[in-house]
Amino acid sequence: MFLGTHSPRLDDKGRLFLPAKYRDELSGGLVITKGQERCLYVFPVEEFQRLTEALRSAPVTAKAVRDYSRVFFASASDEVPDKQGRVTIPPALRQYAGLSRDCVVIGANTRLEIWDSESWSRYEAEQEQKFSDLSEEVLPGVL
């Protein structure tokens, strides 16, 4: 489970230090791909394989499944962090997410998300009230 908010920086080669608390879990490899709201999703290999199986069983006759799968898999990049815990973000993914030097890495349960720091600040500010309003609808009877 991935939790928390971290603020690493991209270096000149497009590498990002993974949060130290997740390096062991991701040391065997990870997959970075496009996420919603112009962020990047980072999955441990095992979780990406689970999603692959779920999408494999979805009906290929459904246009939404085909469209989502094409973008999701075409943009995916498998990476292995270096010994210092850095991972290279491919240029096309950096461009998609608008990543500059300052980034935010958030824990999102089964994945990490990488955001441009300004984009994350805007998103978080827009979502705070919605978060409060939605708790009863998203998790009825739980919270």
Image (spheres, grey):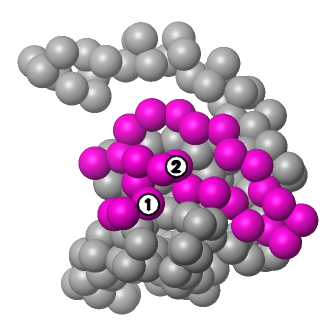
Residue 28 higher or lower than 42, as above or below = below
Res. 45 in view: yes
Q: Which residue is mark 1?
A: 23
Q: What residue is drawn where x is 44% and y is 43%?
A: 107
Depth check: 75 or 104 in front? Answer: 104
Q: Quadrant of residue 52?
A: bottom left
Instruction: Estimate how packed mark 2 is, as few (under 14), some (14 to 19) or many (20 or more) residues with alpha carbons within 10 Å.
Output: some
Depth check: 23 or 37 in front? Answer: 23
Q: Which residue is mark 2?
A: 19
Type of residue at label 2? Pro
Residue 19 image offset from top left, x and y in percent:
52, 49
Quadrant for the C terminus, please. top left
| Apparent side of residue 46 relative to residue 63 in the rendered image (left or right) | left
- The answer to whether marks 2 and 1 mark residues whose Cβ atoms lie closer than 8 Å is yes
Residue 126 image offset from top left, x and y in percent:
65, 21
Task: State the residue lying farthest toward the left.
Answer: 141
Q: What residue is drawn where x is 66% and y is 18%?
A: 125
Residue 109 higher or lower than 32, as above or below = above
Type of residue at label 1? Arg
Residue 117 image offset from top left, x and y in percent:
75, 38
User: Magenta segment: does it hold 23?
Assistant: yes
Res. 59 in view: no
User: Magenta segment: does it hold 59?
Assistant: no
Residue 108 higher or lower than 139, as above or below = below
Depth check: 75 or 46 in front? Answer: 46
Q: Bounds of the magenta span?
A: 1-25
Instruction: Estimate how packed mark 1 is, as few (under 14), some (14 to 19) or many (20 or more) residues with alpha carbons within 10 Å.
Output: some
**Is disc 1 placed on a helix, strand or loop?**
helix
Residue 40 image offset from top left, x and y in percent:
61, 59
Q: What residue is drawn where x is 86% and y is 52%?
A: 100
Q: What residue is drawn where x is 28% and y is 28%?
A: 138
**Is disc 2 placed on a helix, strand or loop?**
loop
